[in-house]
Image (cartoon, rainbow, N blue to C red):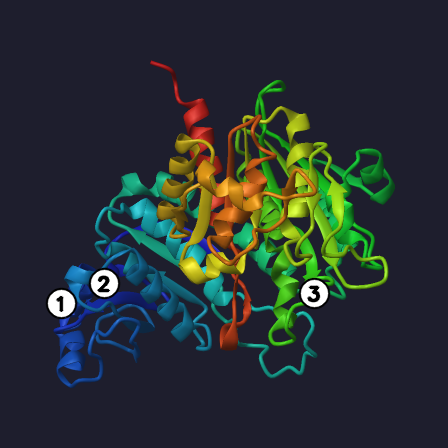
Amino acid sequence: MEYSVKSGTPEKQHSGCLAVGVYTGNKLSDAAQQLDEVTGGAIKQILRRGDHGGKPGQTLLVHNLPHSPSERVLLVGCGKEKEFHEPRYREVTAAAIGALKNTGATEVTSYLTDLDVKGRDVLWKLRHAVEVTEAALYRFDRLKKKNGEDENRRALKRMILAVGSRSDLQPGELAVKEGLAIAAGMRLAKDLGNLPPNICTPAYLAEQAVELARQYGLKSTVLEEAQMRELNMGALLSVARGSHQPPRLIVLEYRGGAEHEAPIALVGKGVTFDTGGISIKPAANMDEMKFDMCGAASVLGAIKATAELKLPLNVVGVIPATENMPGGQASRPGDVITSMSGQTVEILNTDAEGRLILCDALTYAGRFNPALVIDIATLTGACVVALGGHASGLFANNDQLARELLNAGKYTWDRAWQLPLWEDYQKGLDSNFADMANVSGGRDAGAIIGASFLARYTKDYKWAHLDIAGTAWKTGKEKGATGRPVPMLTQFLIDRARKESAPSE
């Protein structure tokens, strides 16, 4: 999909299609009003006939409006004008693309960007238009037999995004560039998440990281089992014991900042399939445990977006990758293992494996003397119960870091909600036989207990933990990876880069 930014009024646009907004109550957006005037009131006549009511996401494609130089006009319902906000804007943008992608239109000039979104400027609208459009056009069909039936389904090739002033053109191009970079990172994360576990193994994840490094000139390092053993990564290796697929520790380094500038470390959980191990999961929906590596996928996606934008930062990605399988060599409930940090862990439940691979990866990340560390993991079902699929769970040992992530999530509509990380919860990890247990004895505060476990390994640096168990993929009819939280992470890095490059007072 090609994107460009253009200024000009709608009645002068020669385009395959114009997209304009219509509110309930037959209220026209500014662009629709201008178009209605030049067409002799044709749009209002359509509304009066009841063919379009302005309901959110409702669309009507109109051909050959009088005196309009465009071939088609797409009327897109926006709901009540007073209730038009960020999610509604994204909804109507997606609806417009959904209506057009199976038509013969090869391009669309979108005047949905002139809709007033409270608190958001035109640059926000441009960027989200790109991200939403790319998401609406995304399909994962590489494993399906091509039968030729859908060859023309993506006739839409170009989108022109309208702005009201020529002064918006240059910053608008940057907004489009950022949107495309984030969309590319999300696409990579989705593709990896959607691949079946017999293809997306730990070795495959490592291969993709190496290819990403080759493509963008990054440094990649892949540690194998023997090297992990030399580093005393007993926690990570304890999870890998039951699988015939050997584990990998993947390290990807993006160096866009000063040589000696401390890097930002992103640590992603990469369990390419999670049976639960000896504490085996129920059979229902176990196929979705291929998504247990979405934290790893989001790290690769965020680094791809960072490289696309050439951000002046140093970023290190650390991905512990393994399967969690039952078997004669698998770890058992009651085993005590020693992590890379030297702390011992009593394994009470082998299905709490994410924290075990992450604790060694977090210790390893400390070797880079990071400015801060963010880990991303589909860690707990308890977080899904608490927050559902709308917000990721956020924990942090630094309030400023937490605020930066929350703000990045609000801007990208990839939101998180901060949960407490109080010392009171640490008692839930007490063990009679080791420094800590990997779970508490009950069901209370499961997401917080998981984060509290990781907190024991992150005392030497600023750290945040994103529990994306509810946001990394959708289930049911729309089953598939979402690419979250690539937008939040990328925006966080963009904000950091701007902060670092801002002139000091």
Residue bearing mark 3: 275
Q: Position of residue 298 (x, y in %)?
A: 57, 50
Q: Residue at x 39, y 66 (%)?
A: 94
112 displayed left or right of 273 = left
Residue bearing mark 2: 11
Is residue 389 visible in the rendered image? The answer is no
- Alpha-carbon span between mark 2 and mark 3: 59 Å
Is residue 72 visible in the rendered image? The answer is yes
What crowding class fits label 1: few (fewer than 14 Cα within 10 Å), some (14-19), or many (20 or more)?
Answer: some
Nearer the observer: mark 1 or 3; the answer is 3
Q: Position of residue 471 (x, y in %)?
A: 48, 58
Tell me if residue 305 comes above or below residue 259 in the rendering.
below
231 displayed left or right of 318 = right
Q: Do the CB atoms of the residues marked 1 and 2 lie less than 8 Å apart?
A: yes
Q: Residue at x 69, y 40 (%)?
A: 434
Q: Position of residue 433 (x, y in %)?
A: 70, 43
What crowding class fits label 2: few (fewer than 14 Cα within 10 Å), some (14-19), or many (20 or more)?
Answer: some
Tell me if residue 389 comes above or below residue 53 in the rendering.
above
